[in-house]
Amino acid sequence: MNFFYYLIIFLGVLAISVIFTMLVKWFALRTGILDRPDKERKTHEKNTPLLGGVAVFLSFFFVLYFARAELLAGNLEARHWVGFFIGACFLMIGGFLDDKYNLKPSRQSIFPILAIASVILGGVSIEKITNPFGGFVYLEILSPIIIVVWLLGMMYTTKLLDGLDGLVSGVSAIGGIVIFLFTMTTKYYQPDVGLASLIFAAACLGFLIFNWHPAKIFLGEGGSLLLGYILGVLAIISGGKIAIALLVMGIPILDVAWTIIRRLKEGKNPFKFADRKHLHFRLLETGLGIKKTVLLYYFFALIFGLSAVFLQSKGKVFALGILVLIMFGAIAYIGRFNRNRIIN
């Protein structure tokens, strides 16, 4: 691996992302596409520009276009990348409309479905996954169903996670870096997917400069879905290494699963009703603060993500088990903390 070659690309994309973010911020301010604070769920105190996901989208696919020769030198065909791109376009269109006109949830859901359909029609599939106990499990017939479930899960994880400044963009950047390292190892060498992952990480970090607390711009509806979408697709095309993304996004995914179960028990729509009971909001209630809460998420994403690069299949299952224990431990601790606060 040519370290300086990839470093130049990384820094170049970072600079491009900064430029696009400033332009998108200016556009959002001029057109009045702003996120206005409320007391129910939002932590910011003043009107903040939306559409930040457009900056990540433009940076990522702009550089991918100029790197197309290297991308097409790998195992993936042009139709795979085109389907990937068209799906992202659907998310950007839907996100813009929602940020501008505040669409109903039933209309919002159309665009993620169209994005997933674009990926599948583009020929992306999951042929097999590694069996932790040896060999492979072949899933070619079930591939479309698994892709639908996986990408919906990833998109709604990043959507529901997008509640604190810099949280989604930072965790997504870590995910991109981990997939880059994984695909650049000798055993799993895929320089095309590795390059795309590095570009994605740099695009996220360029945006993070403006999204770090206190945020100067937010991802918006399309952006919060886009980052989960890109991470999910990269995990698939890197050889179906879904376990890597699961470990990077483990805490947020478990939080979303817990939220869905909790809301269903309460008789509420798990994807419509917004509240402040997500783990990151409950950590704020303990007095941890926004920056420390976000850095805690970064820590777990980085540690467990890097472990996926070195662990074999059984080790990854064990690491996922540890994440589950950490999640339940955090819920128990916060519950006890809140009970003691009420008593006192």
Image (tube, grey):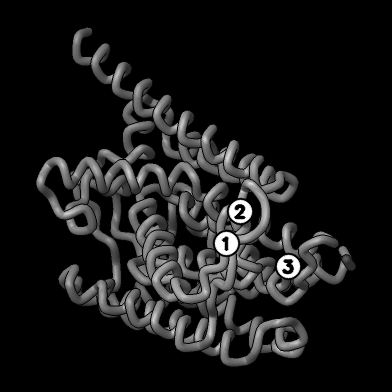
Would residue 309 appear left or right of 291 to someone viewing this image?
Answer: right
Choose top left, top right, bottom left or bottom right for residue 71.
Answer: bottom right
Question: Front-most of 86 and 246?
Answer: 246
Residue 63 in percent (x, y) is at 65, 81
Sequence-earlier tag: 1 or 3:
3
Residue 8 in percent (x, y) is at 80, 70
Quadrant containing the N terminus in the rendered view? bottom right
Q: Secondary structure at mark 3?
A: helix
Would residue 303 appear left or right of 227 to someone viewing this image?
Answer: right
Residues under numbered marks 1 and 2 in contact, where contact means CB atoms less than 8 Å apart: yes
Q: Check disc 3 and report the residue beneath it.
A: 10
Question: Front-most of 246 and 51?
Answer: 246
Quadrant containing the C terminus in the rendered view? top left
Q: Check disc 2 and report the residue beneath it.
A: 131
Q: Secondary structure at mark 1?
A: strand
Report the residue at 32% width, 33% height from top: 282
